[in-house]
Amino acid sequence: MKIVLSNEAMAWFKEEMETTAGEYIRFYARYGGSSQLHEGFSLGVTKEEPMELAVELIEENIHFYIEERDVWYFDGHDLHVNIDSKLQELTYSYKK
């Protein structure tokens, strides 16, 4: 399992979340909504330090990660993070 981040998504994090080198961005399972993987759950994103890091991608010294407690949500899939060019919002896809 890994995190794959497009260049456009990286630019989005820097601009929209004002993310800078040395900070941590967490992807997590949240109750509510739906996703390609689970009905009733969706993917959330927040800026916070890890407690029990399971998966990490470091780009431009920014740490993108998933906690051990959220690994179940991905069901063995890689997380691909991109941008919807029309809405200028993050998009997520999951690939084995």
Image (cartoon, grey):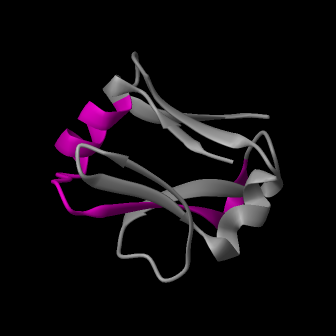
Residue 1 vertical position relative to residue 28 in the rendered view, above or below: above
Q: How many marks?
A: 0
Question: Does the magenta-highlighted stretch encompass residue 84?
Answer: no
Residue 31 vertical position relative to residue 80 in the rendered view, above or below: below
Tell me what residue is drawn at x 55 percent, y 80 percent.
Answer: 52
Left or right side of 93 for 12? left
Question: Does the magenta-highlighted stretch encompass residue 13?
Answer: yes
Q: Nearer the viewer, residue 61 or 11?
A: 61
Tell me what residue is drawn at x 35 percent, y 57 percent.
Answer: 63
Asked which quadrant contains residue 88, the reply is top left
Of the 4 image quadrants, the one containing the C terminus is: top right
- Measured as percent of width and height from the top left, residue 38 is found at 82, 52
Residue lying furthest bottom in this view? 51
Tell me what residue is drawn at x 78 percent, y 64 percent.
Answer: 72
- Measured as percent of width and height from the top left, residue 73 is found at 75, 59
Asked which quadrant contains residue 8, the reply is top left
The segment highlighted magenta reads 9-34
Residue 64 vertical position relative to residue 47 in the rendered view, above or below: above
- Measured as percent of width and height from the top left, residue 32 is found at 69, 62
Left or right side of 40 for 8? left
Left or right side of 71 for 18? left
Tell me what residue is drawn at x 47 percent, y 29 percent.
Answer: 82
Q: Nearer the viewer, residue 48 or 44?
A: 48
- Measured as percent of width and height from the top left, residue 47 is found at 33, 65
